[in-house]
Image (spheres, helix red, strand yellow):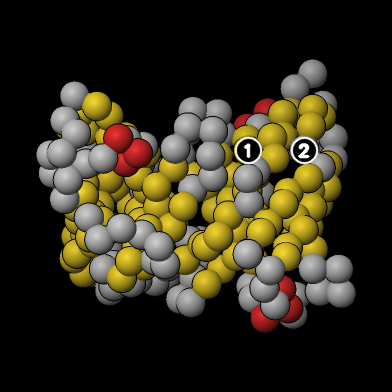
Amino acid sequence: EVQLLESGGGLVQPGGSLRLSCAASGFSFNNYPMSWVRQAPGKGLEWVSSITYNGGSTYYADSVKGRFIISRDNSKNTLYVQMNSLRAEDTAVYYCARKSGGSWFDPWGQGTLVTVSS
Amino acid sequence: EIVMTQSPATLSVSPGERATLSCRASQSVSSHLAWYQQKPGQAPRLLIYGASTRATGIPARFSGSGSETEFTLTISSLQSEDFAVYYCQQYDNWPPWTFGQGTKVEIK
């Protein structure tokens, strides 16, 4: 069974940093591009960042460019996002998702909540 | 950036009835469109990709249609477990990959 399990969320002050992890299992992690998608409380889905299967290329939403860094460790079947200079508007549930086929997202992890507040 | 617009924002439907959800793209996305279902407190689940191909395990009552800028998700006979929020997403022109704002299907 394909599983994605996020961790690392929590409460952080504005300007602070946090690193999220996503542990993958049940598929050949090193064959798939991966992504982070977030959802602010009561709001819709927002794509955040993506990385190719080997980490050779990365992509970022304008809202996080220059502050977030996506990476992966294929030896550990794990996806990461380092989030720096966090703002209140970064408060959201962060989902990791496998990018499939032409770039839809399937499946998704259960999400981890990041709250940016003083 | 391609903007995805869904309508209506909320759809009130009785169990057993048909639900029709719309998604419009600000420019052509060919058939590069996916639909997701999200229930409260849960992660989104892929329903449809390629505008009309059901994902693995998705019941036949869910169907997708459309191309270029106009797309429809139809639920032929709503079951209790179908009341949820539905999102469309384009993957034709990226980055960014963009989602619609969602349509909530609620019990009438």
Q: Earlier in the sequence, mark 1 or mark 2?
A: 2
Please report contact status of discs 1 and 2: CB closer than 8 Å, yes or no.
Answer: yes
**Does dot 1 land on a helix, a strand or a loop?**
strand
> Which chain's residue wears label 2?
A
Q: Which residue is mark 1?
A: A93
Query: What's the residue type where badge 2 is placed?
Result: Gly
Q: Position of residue B13 (x, y in %)?
A: 17, 32
**From the viewer's perspective, is B42 left or right of A20?**
left
**Does dot 2 land on a helix, a strand or a loop?**
loop
Q: Quadrant of residue B32?
A: bottom left
Q: Position of residue A24 (x, y in %)?
A: 73, 63
Q: Quadrant of residue A16?
A: top right
The residue furthest left is B17
Packing grade of label 2 (10 A; few <14, some 14-19, many >=20) is some
**From the viewer's perspective, is B42 left or right of A117?**
left
Q: Position of residue B95 (x, y in %)?
A: 52, 65
Front-most of residues A104 and A70: A104
Query: Does residue B91 appear anywhere in the picture?
Result: yes
Q: Which residue is mark 2?
A: A9
In percent of the image, x 17 and y 45: which residue is there?
Answer: B77
**Number of the label disc, if any, that sits on residue A52:** none
In percent of the image, x 27 and y 74: which residue is there?
Answer: B30
Front-most of residues B13 and A21: B13
Q: Quadrant of the C terminus of chain B?
A: top left
Figure check: A71 above or below B107: below
